[in-house]
Image: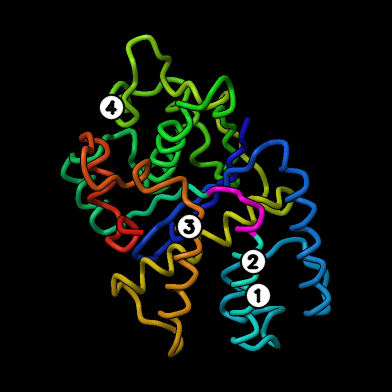
Amino acid sequence: MKVCYVDESGTGDEPVATMVGIIVDSQRMHVTKAHWNELLDVLSKIVGKKLAELHTRDFYAGSGVWYQMKGPDRAKVITAIFEWLKERKHHIVYSAVVKEAYYDSLCNGKIPKELSTPWRFLALHLILAIQKRYQREEKTKGNTIIIFDNEERERTRITDLINLPPAWCDTYYDKQLTQERLDQIVDVPYFGDSAEVPLIQVADFVTFFLRRYAEIKGNHTKPRYVDEPERIEEWAKLISSLSIGRSHIYPLKGRCPLGDIFFSHAPKAIREM
């Protein structure tokens, strides 16, 4: 069985929103959580303050407790965290949306009314990609529990979507006649506090850089420093190397109508990862 820890980035005023799930084999979950806490202990010693969690936005900007750590040193820590994740052989599922295009299509009735927020749009895409990737696993190896970061406004809506998946979801993962809908998703999604669920913090870390990559690569925002595009590109490659596979998320051909909706509203840079 697998557990997927999910967080999002860019659901405020940012031009792009992203969502990332860290997929962990349940047998290795506890080790990863312990190692993440050890990493936080190291960072706590660097800043001279006990850190309960890593707020990636503050860390990357060098604000708050991070103001004394120089940019190049923070960049080294970022690369080290991605390498740390790669060593543990976890997988990543991701989704992204250009919000201006999304809202335009929503207003014109081109997006199902059940996906009336970017968060819901991204969350369903993640769940469908997981279903598509793991439904061929033997026995229960592909069964996945989904744990989102707390999002009270979305909890009921996404729960209803998973409890009673609309028939228009079926084609995304080529549902068979005798197959139950979303049969790889265990129960309804759960929600947790990132301060208490370390692997949600890992998802927060990855989704922040996925969004940053999409924004810079798509000219939605300007780089903050001279070599940021090169560094972001390097980190995006690490994210891509851990992916469950583009064919399950943004296939280049053979897409169903729902797959086309997710594909056409995603940043070009993310579709091509």
CB within 8 Å, label 1 to label 2: yes
Quick check: 7 left or right of 215? right
Q: Quadrant of the N terminus?
A: top right
SS at mark 1?
helix
**Which of the marked residues, 4 or 2, is nearer the chain's N terminus?**
2
Q: CA distance from mark 4 to mark 1?
A: 41 Å
Residue receiving disc 2 = 81
Neighbour class for label 2 at 10 Å: few (<14), some, many (≥20)? some
SS at mark 3?
helix
Residue 65 screen position, x and y as percent: 72, 78
Q: Quadrant of residue 147?
A: top right
Q: Residue at x 62, y 37 (%)?
A: 3
What are the residue bounds of the magenta stretch?
Answer: 85-91
Residue receiving disc 1 = 77
Residue receiving disc 3 = 241
**Which of the marked residues, 1 or 3, is nearer the chain's N terminus?**
1
* Residue kind at label 1, given as amino acid type: Val
* Residue kind at label 4, given as amino acid type: Thr
SS at mark 2?
helix
Residue 57 screen position, x and y as percent: 56, 70
Quick check: 204 left or right of 215? right
Residue receiving disc 4 = 171
**Which of the marked residues, 2 or 3, is nearer the chain's N terminus?**
2
